C-alpha cells in the first residue's frame, strides 16, 4: 500500500469531520456572516504563515524541497482579503488559543522533524484546491463577499487541478522516509485534521454559543 493511501485510510473519518462540523458547517449552511468569516480568515492566516515559513526554512532538506510549492502558498493572499474585509479592525484581532497551539506545534516540527510539515501542507493546500471553487460561490452569493475579499481562493497558476493533485500525491508517495518517520507522518496528518477541527469548533463556540 502506498503512503498516500495509508494516509487517506487512516484519516478518512477526521477528514469528513473537518468538512462537516463547527464553523465550516455554519459557512456551508449559510448561517454565518461576513464578520465571522473574516475572523476565520484571520486565524487561517497565522496557520498558513507557520506552514509556509517552515517549508521555506527547510528548502535544503531533500524531502521538503519538492513541497516548496509557492503556487499553493496562501498567506499573502489571505492578508489582502483581511485588509479588504477588516481594514483598521485588523489591528484589534487576536488569535484563538487553538490557533496558537497549531502554530506552536508547527514551530516544534520545524526544530525537531521538519519532514512532518508535509502533513500540514497536504491537509491545508490540497483542501484549498478541492474546496476553493465551492467556497467562492458560497461566499459571493450567500455572504455578498466581493472578489476583492476572495483572493484566498485564487489558484490561477494551476491550470489543471486534478492533474496537479495527482502529481502532489505522487510526490508524497515518492518521499524516502524511514519506517519510524513514515508512521510519524501518517499520525501527524491526523494531528493536522484535529487542529483544524479544534479551530473550527472553537470559533463556532466563541461566536455562536449564545
Image: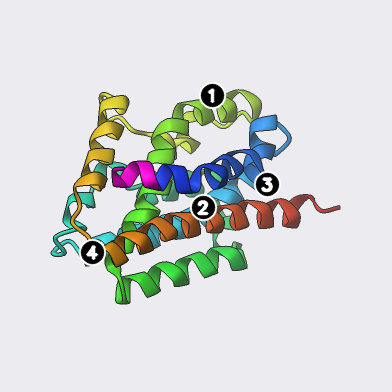
Q: In the picture, which quadrant includes the N terminus? A: top left
Q: Which residue is mark 4?
A: 178
Give the secondary structure at mark 1: helix
Label 2's element?
helix
Q: Which residue is mark 3?
A: 22
Q: Which residue is mark 1?
A: 137
Q: What is the crowding at mark 3: few (fewer than 14 residues within 10 Å), some, or many (at least 20)? A: many
Q: Nearer the viewer, mark 2 or mark 3?
A: 2
Q: Is residue 204 left or right of residue 66?
A: right
Q: Secondary structure at mark 3?
A: helix
Q: Point out residue 187 in the picture as x, y percentages from the top left corner.
A: 43, 59
- Give the residue displayed 71% in from the left and 50% down from the top: 204
> Sequence order check: which comes first, mark 2 or mark 1?
1
Q: Earlier in the sequence, mark 4 or mark 1?
A: 1
| Residue at x-position 74% and y-position 55% | 205
Quote the CA–CA distance across marks 2 and 3: 13 Å
Give the residue pinned by disc 2: 193
Secondary structure of the residue carrying tag 4 is: loop
Residue bounds of the magenta highlight: 1-6
Q: Nearer the viewer, mark 3 or mark 4?
A: 4
Amino acid at each position: 500500500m502506498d503512503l498516500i493511501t495509508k494516509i487517506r485510510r487512516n484519516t478518512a473519518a477526521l477528514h469528513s469531520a473537518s468538512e462537516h462540523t463547527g464553523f465550516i458547517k455554519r459557512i456551508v449552511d449559510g448561517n454565518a456572516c461576513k464578520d465571522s468569516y473574516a475572523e476565520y480568515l484571520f486565524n487561517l492566516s497565522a496557520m498558513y504563515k507557520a506552514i509556509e515559513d517552515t517549508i521555506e526554512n527547510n528548502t535544503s532538506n531533500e524531502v521538503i524541497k519538492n513541497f516548496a510549492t509557492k503556487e499553493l502558498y496562501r498567506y499573502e493572499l489571505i492578508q489582502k482579503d483581511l485588509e479588504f474585509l477588516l481594514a483598521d479592525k485588523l489591528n484589534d484581532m487576536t488569535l484563538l488559543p487553538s490557533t496558537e497551539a497549531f502554530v506552536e506545534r508547527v514551530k516544534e516540527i520545524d526544530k525537531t522533524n521538519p519532514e512532518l510539515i508535509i502533513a500540514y501542507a497536504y491537509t491545508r493546500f490540497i483542501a484549498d484546491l478541492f474546496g476553493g471553487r465551492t467556497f467562492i460561490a458560497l461566499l459571493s452569493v450567500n455572504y455578498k463577499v466581493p472578489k476583492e475579499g476572495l483572493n484566498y481562493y485564487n489558484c490561477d497558476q494551476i491550470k489543471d487541478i486534478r492533474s496537479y493533485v495527482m502529481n502532489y500525491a505522487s510526490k508524497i508517495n515518492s518521499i524516502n522516509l524511514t519506517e519510524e518517520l513514515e508512521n510519524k507522518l501518517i499520525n501527524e496528518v491526523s494531528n493536522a485534521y484535529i487542529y483544524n477541527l479544534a479551530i473550527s469548533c472553537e470559533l463556532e463556540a466563541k461566536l455562536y454559543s449564545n
